[in-house]
Amino acid sequence: MVNTFRYDDVPVLETTGGKLKGYFYNGEYIFKGVPYAEADRFQMPREAKWEGVKEACSYGFVCPLMEVDTPGAELMVPHRYWPQDEHCQSLNIWTKEIGGGKKMPVMVWLHGGGYFAGSSIEQAAYDGFNMCMNGDVVVVSINHRLNILGYLDLSPFGSKYKNSGNAGHADMVAALKWVHDNIALFGGDPDNVTIFGQSGGGMKVADLMQIEEADGLFHKGLIMSGVGDDTLLPSCTGDGREIVTELLKELGISEDEVEKLETIPYYELVKAYKKVSPAIAAKGGYIGGNPLANEYYRGNPIGYGFRDHAFDIPLMVGSVFGEFSFKAASYDKNKLTEEQLKEVISAVYGEHTDEITEVFKEAYPGKSPADLLLVDRVMRQPSKQLARMHAEGKKAAVYLYDFTLEFPIYHNKIAWHCSDIPFFFHNTELVEVCQIPEVRERLEKQMFEAFMAFARTGKPECENLPKWEAVTPEVEPTMIFDRECELRYNFDDKLYEKIDSFLPPFNFMEMMASGDEKIQH
């Protein structure tokens, strides 16, 4: 294939914000760093406007982070790093056609990183080129405000800060409004928009279903490893009176000069926040960092229930076998004797080892019993709960999946958090560890085509997969994505029942604080 690049003859598009010029490469028009909104710190976004023709050929700034990024585990999750600035409200577009006339499904990617980190281009697998090319869809990825820039409530200190505790979510709504108003210029159908995200991005999908202002701006959702209970980034309650008051004291600013918080250098603000917030958090007070449940945002559906409109939105919900089991085991599971396997498992399950091993084999036939120690206790059960809740609405369908592939690293390591992203994006070619002979291309095709079918019709039907049945209040069919894909029914209920009866409740935050992600128990 001869690579093709064009710029000079690419037409200028007239968007609601101003004139925009992208470029053409290998069959696609690409627009990067498109401003969808602008905002002053701690305030609601407003429509972005510009004069002249804006060149959209470079990615926009990403939101500043509170912690310095440290590269690591790049073989498992390859990353890209980018300049940071709090004026980060921009999006990127990949499309085969511009100028209107065609109505392709629109896929809007919401990045992971909780509500505090990440960006639209953070992972190599986030690139939208292959999804657009192979799926005949328009792909959009967005940046928005995070951490204390996106989620710190200053509303007690003035009406100009109304809903500042949800500024990051308001940015996403503004992005979806921009897409709704402009995507037809890029060959997209504003009446067929699917939002999808992984980890924190998956949480944002569910969150947007809980925001009335987002109604009608998207029509389907994929939640990937993004459902958790109250131990995983719960919705905030209360208000920012105490945390902001302590911030002002720490910075030597009086309450009647609260507006100075808008201009103080970001990292000075972060330093003060880190100093005063732990004591408030320790007594259960509001410190921000997560969205605030209020009249704007209904709250995480696990804790607050779905809004009625949410039941009209078809969903795909799933997780991966190992989720946060990033570390390599100290042994090769493939070479353990039966006695050694029992010893490894008994270190966690003690007298229950034989019983739990048999139950695990029933749930995951063909997997090594050593993988029992890596079974996800963060996402799978809440994902099933969310799917049941949605099914109880008896309107739009909801579909469950479980990604259980083993990879050629660390002696056939079981799937980890983010490892399914390249398959849904059709980007396995960009991630070295995905190169599994006779598996990669077939599984990628199955997962990708099912997702594209869902985006078009609301049903993940694909001729290369078994019939995928929707969840009902009584039955939970789950599509197993692996070397061989199959639909199974409530297959791990007994396993989780036993795990939860033998082990204390799992606490994700305690695990992260300990730095031990190897064994999630």
Image (cartoon, grey):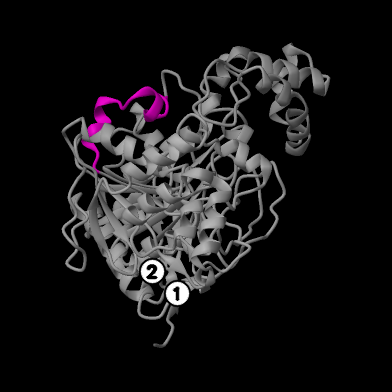
Q: What crowding class fits label 1: few (fewer than 14 Cα within 10 Å), some (14-19), or many (20 or more)?
A: some
- Provide the residue designation for mark 1: 429
Q: Give the residue at the far right of this rendering.
A: 252
- In the figure, residue 474 lies in which quadrant? top left
Q: Is residue 416 above or below residue 473?
A: below
Mark positioned earlier in the residue sequence (2 or 1): 2
Q: Is residue 306 magenta?
A: yes
Q: Is residue 102 left or right of residue 283?
A: left
What quarter of the picture does the N terminus occupy?
Answer: bottom left
The kind of residue on which mark 1 rests is Glu
Note whether residue 121 is visible: no
Residue at the spot x=52%, y=37% of the render? 506
Horizontal and vertical percent position of residue 246: 74, 18
Q: Is residue 341 above or below residue 268?
A: below
Q: Is residue 337 left or right of residue 137?
A: right
- In the figure, residue 446 lies in which quadrant? bottom left
Horizontal and vertical percent position of residue 94: 39, 62
Front residue (pair 372, 344): 344
- Provide the residue designation for mark 2: 130
